[in-house]
Amino acid sequence: MSEEEVITEKKKISMNMDELTFGEMEMFEDVTGLIMSDAIKTDIVRDAAGRPVPDPDDPKGRPLKETKMGVKAMMGMVFISMHRDDSSVTFDDVRKIKLSDVDLELSEDDEDDTGKDEISEQS
């Protein structure tokens, strides 16, 4: 990406964590210096009583989850996404992007019903 290129509209970045290649995970760790499994955590959202909050958008009734990560991990995910489209993108290019210019959404394939069982056990 050249110095003249500027993001003119919000860039939507959707990434399915289960679709990352080993090479992309290695690239993430190389550019950020972080171990991916330590840098990006997905937790079940719980109410004040500690019960899982159901995800209103999940027809199976699984719990709502939130992904937590630091700035460097977020930059790593943006870098991987942009690098997929343009291999000339560097981590320094990502450093120049405003947070307000990126809409980052991470997801995982969620085939098991573990969360559903957890909700019924605590009801």
Image: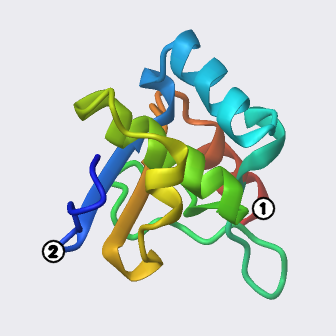
Q: Mark 1 — residue?
A: 122
Binning the other alpha carbons within 10 Å of mark 2 as few (below 14), some (14 to 19) or many (20 upward) gives few
Rendered location of residue 28, percent (x, y): 62, 32
Front one among 65 and 88? 88
Q: Residue furthest front?
A: 3
Which comes sooner in the sequence, label 2 or label 1? Answer: 2
Residue for point 37% across, 39% down? 89
Rendered location of residue 7, percent (x, y): 22, 68
Q: In the picture provided, is 113 more to the left or to the right than 106?
A: right
Rendered location of residue 55, percent (x, y): 47, 65
Q: Does residue 5 lie above or below 90 as drawn? A: below
Q: How is the image coloured?
A: rainbow
Identify the amino acid type marked 2: Thr
User: Could you say which disc has been placed on residue 8 in the image?
Assistant: 2
Q: Does residue 6 lie above or below 119 as drawn? A: below
Front one among 66 and 114? 66
Q: Quadrant location of residue 117?
A: top right
Binning the other alpha carbons within 10 Å of mark 1 as few (below 14), some (14 to 19) or many (20 upward) gives few
Q: Quadrant location of residue 49?
A: bottom right
Residue for point 29% across, 46% down? 1
Q: Residue furthest left?
A: 8
Q: Residue furthest top?
A: 22
Rendered location of residue 51, percent (x, y): 76, 71
Q: Would residue 38 be seen by someone viewing this image from the given angle?
A: yes
* Mark 2 or 1, closer to the camera: 2
Mark 1 secondary-structure assignment: helix
Q: Quadrant of the C terminus?
A: bottom right
Mark 2 secondary-structure assignment: loop
Front one among 37 and 46? 37
Identify the amino acid type marked 1: Gln
Q: In the picture provided, is 21 more to the left or to the right than 36?
A: left
Q: Does residue 48 lie above or below 122 as drawn? A: below
